[in-house]
Amino acid sequence: MINRRTFTGLVAGTLAATGKSFAQTARGKTVFYANLGPELSLYDVDADAATLTRRSSVMLPAGVQYAWPHPSKRFFYVASSNGQPGGGAANQGNKHFANAFRIDPATGALTPHGQPLTLDSRPIHISVDGAGGFAMIAYNEPSHVTVHRINADGTFGALVQQRSKPDVGIYSHQIRTTPSNKTVILVCRGNNPDGGKGEDPGSLKVFGLNDGQLANLASYAPGNGYGFGPRHLDFHPTLPFVYVSLERQNKLYTYALQADGTLSRDPLFMKDSLGEPNNRRPGQGAGTIHVHPNGRFVYQANRNSNLVDFQGKKIFAGGENNMAVWSIDQKTGEPTLIQNADGHANQLRTFGSDPSGRMLVAASVNPILMREGNTVSNLSAGLTVYRIGADGKLTFARKYDVDTSKGTQFWSGMVSLG
């Protein structure tokens, strides 16, 4: 546990690096994007009514994998691939790209901007550094990263050839710069045992960042990475804490973010994300994680789509598909689970909240058959909309059914316009 003097220094360092304060509030219109295969759609957001209105869409050269806005809010970067989740070369595909778009500041409409990048394998995550000078892409199989310059006009520039080989772990899943923009964290999930093959350990890799060059600084792998399967992380907006979602264990770990951009040697807190952790089902996993804009709450997806045979059909085998809601102690950073809100859908892979912190939208990957007594019904894929209360808890507002027969709903997110 960090002491008061260390904590105060970390807070001061974080605030100085980010230039943020609790009093800051979002400005401008907010829009929501969600994909179906290669089609990326734009939705207007009404946080008061908790509604979405679809306005337009753009087509990518392959299925959308992840997307990220430029800090200027003028440009948008989308990674796409015809690869699919799962191990083995057969699932990795042969078409992989990153595209840049201009964002209409009034409507959020996207316009292609410059030439796309052709990538060497399936990109699982893309992000932009805090200064907007570099796009960083993580690839899961084989695990590696690339850094690309962003030109002054927002188009993609040259690949940054790394002078030293980054330590990329096993199955990288997310790459983010820290709030100081001096370091980068790569989240490496590892893999569960499968088919007689042993577990691949997970880890968090921290690199120094200097003009696009990644320098190995630290590796964090509790238990040598066994029983440690991180998927995504997010940073507290004003305090020096990092929240890490452990996919393979359905847990939430909290680390201290040090003034030099590295992490505390050990997690400060380790918590279960499931409503019934003692009844954890096969196929259960945790997903995306986001801290509320006010820093008082953190949200984490729990997911399960395991199937069993029933009446000649493959139906849901049971488990938790919900949003875990945590309150955050503003002194220690400790998260406390206060709710597991029903997802009303299967596999909530991605979600986002509006900058005012009043509305959250979660996108499910695909439909699933559910047993109700001796009958079977279809639980549709969709966009699940919640109101966020002053206490951080989620109240179901509505669900927009989505037909995923033409493509997987793999990514979604809120973007505040300039």
Image: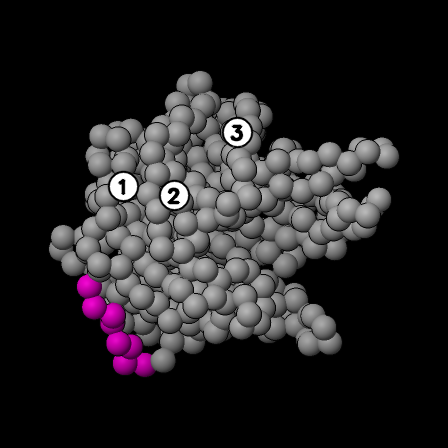
Residue on which the image places disc 2: 40
Residue 90 coordinates in the image, percent (x, y): 55, 70
Q: What stretch is highlighted in magenta?
A: 157-164
Residue on which the image places disc 3: 400
Q: Is residue 144 above or below residue 7?
A: below
Q: Which mark is residue 110?
A: 1
Residue 339 coordinates in the image, percent (x, y): 63, 34
Residue 77 coordinates in the image, percent (x, y): 30, 52
Q: Give whichever of discs 1 and 2 has the lower sequence position.
A: 2
How crowded pointer 3 is (Cα within 10 Å; few <14, some 14-19, many 20+) is rated as: some
Labelled pair 1, 2 in contact (Cβ < 8 Å) = yes
Q: Which residue is drawn at 36% across and 55% down?
A: 61
Q: Does the magenta stretch include residue 412?
A: no
Give the amino acid type for the residue marked by disc 3 in the picture.
Tyr
Q: Distance between the residues labelled 1 and 3?
A: 22 Å
Q: How far apart are marks 1 and 2 (CA)?
A: 9 Å
Give the amino acid type for the residue marked by disc 2 in the picture.
Leu
